[in-house]
Image (spheres, coloured by chain):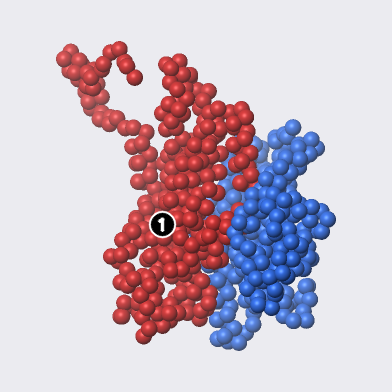
Chain colours: A blue, B red
């Protein structure tokens, strides 16, 4: 097991180097990050040239890449080319906000999805099953940005019509409110709801399919044959085994969301890492974009590994060597 | 391809008739139609109610997009200054209302469907082709080629997909739908490559492949003539679902401003005008609902195709 983990970790390094180099080339070719400064009449050409030199923009791309790699370790991911501020504090702050939103959303989605999946499987082809099957099909077909926008418009309308502020529709906080306050909850409720609905569709489908797979196995027939009450069969034999694939999917989903709540955060102007990325990409802020890609790639690789380990741990039939 | 004995079609049946014998199944009063594997699949598909509903709806929606020039009452750029942000009406022919500079929204949605279907079909075809070639080579040859190709596949799979797509769009200068499609296609082939590789890996050990080898067939012939037909089921299913995914991702890219740029109307960028005018519900509802409808139909068709083409993968009815 340990050798397996070690090999996976070692293997992920060339992947990271290759993928980060490719993205580095992509973003570098996309345009000049200092174009905005050049257009500023108050900055002389010499100043801009000096900045170009300071941030190694006058070097060839492989050399710049090398400087960037050095910056990761010596300067904590370097400095933004737009604000000339260090990137690391921004990443930490936005990642914290994103984590707050996705942890709440995922936990809710798992609880709801698993519950609905169990009942859909037990009462297969009932009205309940058909209802939630339709809901999850809709969830799969619905573009995230559209769902987010619908929720936003709905609550804007409620506010304009009746003057009741149930949830805020953009931003993260009202002024002078803390991280753990009712105000924060009112702000992140809609992003949480959006992510929760999308993830719920996934979890409830997988849980249902997984339950049905297990229900048809021999050991469940045995459990019934030896006279166990039905709830014991379901909870003790079916449910526990059906959860195994859900654990992996949750880990993968979590890794994906860590960098992938881009759309939801953009719609709600939430100060999370995805929104940060989209803004920086629009400004062609090379080092900030690279920082984001690196952090999220590491996140995804880490959670992929967690998913694999979890799978081997929960299901003794799987052996890694 | 030189066979020693040339066989005429119908040769054997002629012999039977000549011998005064009749088809045994007809004699027994049973009519057994000879059906190919494909006709079985077709029957299974035609009986799949959801898939057929999806197919009919999709034909209507995609047909509207395909013949947008004839169906749309206006051009997608034509400005009607008397009707700015007009709500939907049946009179005056603004079925879906108008946007913030008075362009007919119905026409724009119809042309948006055309853009979406161009992107979806292009991405599905190109990415299936790449995935097929990569998967076939990796699975058939195995060894270091397999290792290398699968590591590349892993690389694409472990990246933050949307972020990389956005970055690529920023580089390649998004704008027109073909550029966006090429970017998407270059990211979409990995799923199919894995599926095809798996099938090739198991089928290359089969007797008929050995027989083909013994008969002197080359690698390309064995791969595409003998093994490929067995992977067509998964390829078709995966390709169908790729159309839906491509349409969803394109819409998201365009919504974020990194995909298709105006003046080309795309369903994703149409929703943006709904975001800037949240009070005008029709600007959000119609393009969004169209995307949902298209994707829903394609998913149903994909499910139906899977049930029809892949009897081994007996899914419990969804």
Q: Residue at x 43, y 77 (%)?
A: B99
x and y, in percent, of residue B292 in the image: 47, 62
Q: Residue furthest front?
A: A46
The chain letter under disc 1 is: B
Residue drawn where x is 51% and y is 71% of the image: B272
Residue B311 visible: no
State the image quarter where residue A153 is shown: bottom right
Work out whether B82 lies above or below B13.
below
Residue B239 in the image: above or below residue A159: above
Residue sitting nearer the eye, A50 or B205: A50
Name the residue at the right extreme. A74
From the top left corner, tell me how far across and down residue B113 is, in percent.
Answer: 40, 62
Nearer the observer, B184 or A143: B184
In the rendered image, residue B25, in percent from the top left (x then y), is placed at: 25, 24
Q: Is residue B219 above or below residue B44?
A: above
Residue at image mark 1: B117
In the foreground, B120 or A114: B120
Quadrant holding the N terminus of chain A: top right
> Residue at image x 28%, y 65%?
B70
Q: Quadrant of the C terminus of chain A?
A: top right
Q: Is residue A125 left or right of residue A52?
A: left
Residue A276 seen in render: yes
State the residue at coordinates (71%, 46%): A17
Closer to us: A213 or A181? A181
Q: Describe the element under mark 1 as helix, strand or loop.
A: helix
């Amino acid at each position: 097991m340990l050798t397996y983990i070690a090999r996976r970790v070692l293997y992920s390094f060339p992947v990271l180097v290759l993928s980060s180099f490719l993205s580095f080339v992509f973003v570098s070719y996309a345009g000049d990050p200092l174009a905005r400064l050049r257009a500023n009449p108050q900055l002389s050409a010499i100043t801009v040239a000096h900045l170009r030199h300071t941030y190694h923009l006058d070097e060839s791309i492989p050399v710049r890449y090398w400087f960037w790699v050095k910056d990761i370790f010596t300067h904590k991911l370097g400095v933004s080319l737009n604000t000339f501020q260090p990137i690391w504090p921004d990443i930490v702050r936005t990642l914290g906000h994103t984590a707050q939103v996705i942890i709440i959303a995922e936990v809710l989605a798992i609880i709801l999805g698993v519950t609905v999946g169990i009942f859909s499987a037990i009462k297969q082809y009932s009205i309940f099953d058909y209802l939630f099957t339709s809901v999850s099909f809709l969830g799969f077909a619905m573009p995230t940005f559209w769902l987010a926008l619908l929720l936003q418009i709905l609550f804007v309308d409620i506010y304009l019509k009746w003057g009741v502020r149930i949830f805020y529709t953009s931003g993260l906080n009202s002024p002078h409110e803390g991280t753990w306050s009712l105000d924060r909850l009112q702000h992140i409720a809609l992003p949480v709801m959006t992510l929760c609905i999308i993830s719920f569709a996934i979890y409830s489908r997988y849980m249902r399919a997984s339950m049905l797979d297990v229900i048809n196995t021999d050991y469940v027939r045995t459990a019934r044959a030896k006279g166990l009450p039905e709830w014991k069969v379901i909870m003790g034999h079916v449910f526990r085994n059906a959860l195994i694939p859900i654990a992996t999917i949750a880990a993968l989903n979590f890794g994906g969301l860590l960098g992938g709540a881009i759309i939801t955060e953009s719609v709600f102007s939430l100060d999370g890492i995805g929104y940060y990325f989209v803004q920086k990409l629009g400004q062609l802020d090379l080092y900030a974009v690279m920082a984001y890609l690196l952090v999220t790639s590491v996140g995804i690789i880490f959670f992929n590994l967690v998913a694999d380990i979890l799978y081997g741990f929960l299901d003794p039939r799987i052996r890694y060597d | 391809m030189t066979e020693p004995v040339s066989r005429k079609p119908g040769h054997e049946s002629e012999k039977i008739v000549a011998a005064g014998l009749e088809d045994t199944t007809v004699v027994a009063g049973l009519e057994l139609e000879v059906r190919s594997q494909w006709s079985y699949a077709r029957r299974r598909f035609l009986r799949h109610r959801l898939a057929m509903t999806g197919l009919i709806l999709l034909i209507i929606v995609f047909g509207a997009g395909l013949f947008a020039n004839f169906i749309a009452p206006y051009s997608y750029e034509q400005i009607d200054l008397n009707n700015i942000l007009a709500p939907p009406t049946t009179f005056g022919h603004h079925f879906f209302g108008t946007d913030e500079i008075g362009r007919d929204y119905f026409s724009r949605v119809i042309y948006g469907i055309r853009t979406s279907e161009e992107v979806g079909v292009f991405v599905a075809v190109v990415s299936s082709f790449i995935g097929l070639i990569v998967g076939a080579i990796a699975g058939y040859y195995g060894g270091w080629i397999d290792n290398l190709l699968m590591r590349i596949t892993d690389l694409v799979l472990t990246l933050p997909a949307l972020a990389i797509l956005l970055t690529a769009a920023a580089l390649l200068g998004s704008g027109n739908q073909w550029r966006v499609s090429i970017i998407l296609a270059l990211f979409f082939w990995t799923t199919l490559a894995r599926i095809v590789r798996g099938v090739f890996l198991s089928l290359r050990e089969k007797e008929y492949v050995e027989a083909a080898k013994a008969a002197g067939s080359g690698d390309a012939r064995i791969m595409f003539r003998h093994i490929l037909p067995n992977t067509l089921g998964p390829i078709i299913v995966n390709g169908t679902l790729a159309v839906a995914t491509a349409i969803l991702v394109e819409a998201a890219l365009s919504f974020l401003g990194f995909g298709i740029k105006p003046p080309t109307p795309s369903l994703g960028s149409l929703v943006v005008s709904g975001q800037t005018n949240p009070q005008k519900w029709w600007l959000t509802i119609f393009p969004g609902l169209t995307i949902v409808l298209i994707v829903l139909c394609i998913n149903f068709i994909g499910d139906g195709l899977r049930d029809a083409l892949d009897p081994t993968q007996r899914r419990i009815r969804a």
